[in-house]
Amino acid sequence: MTPFELATTKEIIKELSSRAKAKRKKIRMSQKEFSEHIGMKFSTYARFEKTGLISLSNFVDTMRGLNSITDLEALLIVENENLKIQW
């Protein structure tokens, strides 16, 4: 996998869905079992694993179901209030 800073948005999305699939398999749940576990439609979760497309809300539910919610917490921490984003 290309490092995220060099990857396209599409590549990053696909990698995240691939990692979620790997974690789901590690806990030995089928897509159907996992989607029921997190209260999501099976078709929605299956589409996420196949295409990477999912709403932010459903992604958060997926991360929670994979016991990875703390990984999300660290994503957008602002450490320096003087931080300026340059485009």
Image: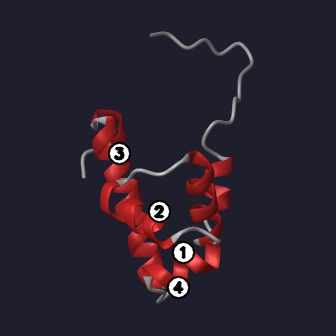
Q: Amino acid at mark 4?
A: Glu
Q: Is the residue under label 2 in contact with that under label 1 (CB below 8 Å)?
A: yes
Quarter residue 68 falls in = bottom right
Look at the numbered disc 2 and give the secondary structure of its residue: helix
Location of mark 3 (residue)? 12
The answer to whether mark 3 and mark 1 are in CB contact below 8 A is no
Residue 19 picture location, percent across and down: 40, 64
Residue at the limit of the structure toward the left, as seen here:
1
Q: Which residue is mark 1?
A: 35
Q: Secondary structure at mark 4?
A: helix
> Type of residue at label 2?
Thr
Q: 68 or 3: nearer the eye?
A: 68
Foreground of the two, 17 or 26: 17
Residue 18 is situated, as x and y percent measured from the top left of the image, at 35, 63
Q: Are marks 4 and 1 in contact (CB under 8 Å)?
A: yes
**Residue 33 disc label:** 4
Question: Amino acid under label 1?
Answer: Ser
Do the residues under discs 2 and 3 have CB atoms within 8 angstroms?
no
Q: Which residue is the site of mark 2?
A: 44
Mark 1: give few (<14), some (14-19) or many (20+) Cα within 10 Å.
many
Circle nearer the N terminus (2, 3): 3
